[in-house]
Amino acid sequence: MKLNWKLRFKNKATLTAIVATALLLAQQLGLKLPDNINDVANTALTLLVLLGVVSDPTTAGVSDSDRAMTYTEPK
C-alpha cells in the first residue's frame, strides 16, 4: 500500500478524521472522556466516512496512484 502521507496530512478533512478516530479508539480502550467529546468525534467520523474523505474514491484499491504520489499540494 503506497500512500502520499505528506499530501494526506496537509488535508484538513483527513486530519479531522484521524483525530476523530483516535478519540474513538480512546473510547473503545475504556478511557473516560466527556460524553460530548465522544458524541462529536463519532458524528464527525461518520460524516467524513459518508462523504468519502477517509478513503480516496479516485484510485483503485487503497493505494494512491503513481500520479498522486508525485503531488506536493492537493490538486
Image (tube, helix red, strand yellow):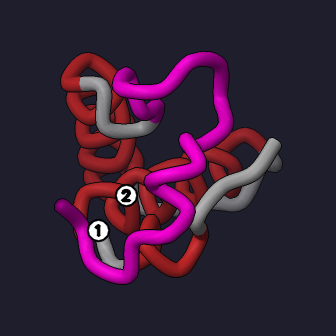
Q: Which residues are magenta?
A: 55-75
The secondary structure that dominates the magenta segment is: loop
The answer to which quarter of the image holds residue 47 is top left
In the rendered image, residue 20 lying in the magenta stretch gets the answer no
In the rendered image, residue 72 lying in the magenta stretch gets the answer yes
Q: Identify the element where label 2 is drawn.
A: helix
Query: Which residue lies under the disc numbered 1?
Result: 11
Q: Amino acid at mark 2?
A: Thr
Using the image as rendered, state which of residue 21 and residue 39 is in the foreground: 21
Using the image as rendered, state which of residue 29 and residue 35 is in the foreground: 29
Q: Is residue 37 left or right of residue 66?
A: left
Q: Is residue 27 left or right of residue 40?
A: right
Mark 2 touching mark 1, by CB under 8 A? Answer: yes
Label 2, label 1: how far apart the Cα atoms are: 5 Å
Q: Is residue 37 above or below residue 71?
A: above
Residue 40, percent across and down?
A: 25, 47
